Amino acid sequence: MKKRNTPEEDSARPAGSKPEQHDDTSNGSSSRRKFLTAATAVVGATGAAIAFWPFLASWQPSARARSLGAPVQIDLSKLEPGARITVMWQGKPVWVVRRTPEMLEALGHDHLLGRLRDPESEVDTQQPVYAQNELRAINPEYFVVIAICTHLGCVPLWRPNFPEERIDEDWMGGFFCPCHKSKFDLAGRVFTGVPAPTNLVIPPHWYAEPDLVEIGVEDENYLNELPS
Ligand code: FES
């Protein structure tokens, strides 16, 4: 069992401030990790994250961290089923949603799939290859997505509950952009008949541990071995 931070420590923390249990990744496994930008490769001690979920501590990133767009680690151990956490990465809001079994079941509903523009994530610009699957995730339970509408860039609203007749009489949970009424399901897949042209974007990420996700970093193993 890995060591965890105390509740007083941040749940979303800069990537450079790793806990002790990550020491092993600084040897053999760290060589597998691919930093996506030169900036993130040399930063080491800075990152940018803000956690808004009430039971998680907030952390205000420095202006320098924001400008560098350092990777951001998020401790998921206290994220409850059905809840969402928001962090900032490269100046963009990123959501992590812990999907419940009910939510996951809804995502495979035939009635929903028939109303989606790209239900199997075939537009490959919208996610890394390791998230190019129906649930758009490495771990189906956790959905990681950039919270920016693919129409004109508004931040959609989180509307996980269903039914929600104000949005759609068949609403099964997801994200609703009030700017021009685009709708996305709980995998960020866009509905047909709305202005947004594509699914929401999945950022590069990997799991340093089962409940520790890092945004802005990829594991080369994910690129070679697609999750089942
Ligand atoms: S910006 Fe989201 S629908 Fe237009």
Image (tube, rainbow, N blue to C red):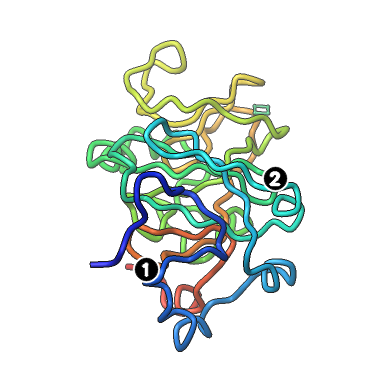
Name the disc covering residue 91, or none. 2
Which of the 4 image quarters holds residue 160? top left
Q: Is residue 121 left or right of residue 140?
A: right
- Mark 2 or 1: the one toward you: 2
- Which residue type carries mark 2? Gly
x and y, in percent, of residue 114 in the image:
41, 37
Say which amino acid is labelled 1: Pro
Dot 2 or dot 1: first in sequence order is 2
Q: How far apart are marks 2 and 1 (CA)?
A: 29 Å
- Asked whether residue 143 is in view, the answer is yes
* Disc number for residue 227: 1
Picture quarter with ligand 1: top right
Residue 117 at least partly seen: no
Q: Give the crowd class for mark 2: few <14, some 14-19, many >=20 residues within 10 Å.
A: some
Q: How many labels does the image show?
A: 2
Quick one: 16 or 145, which is closer to the camera? 16
Helix, strand or loop at label 2? It is loop
**Label 1: element kind:** loop
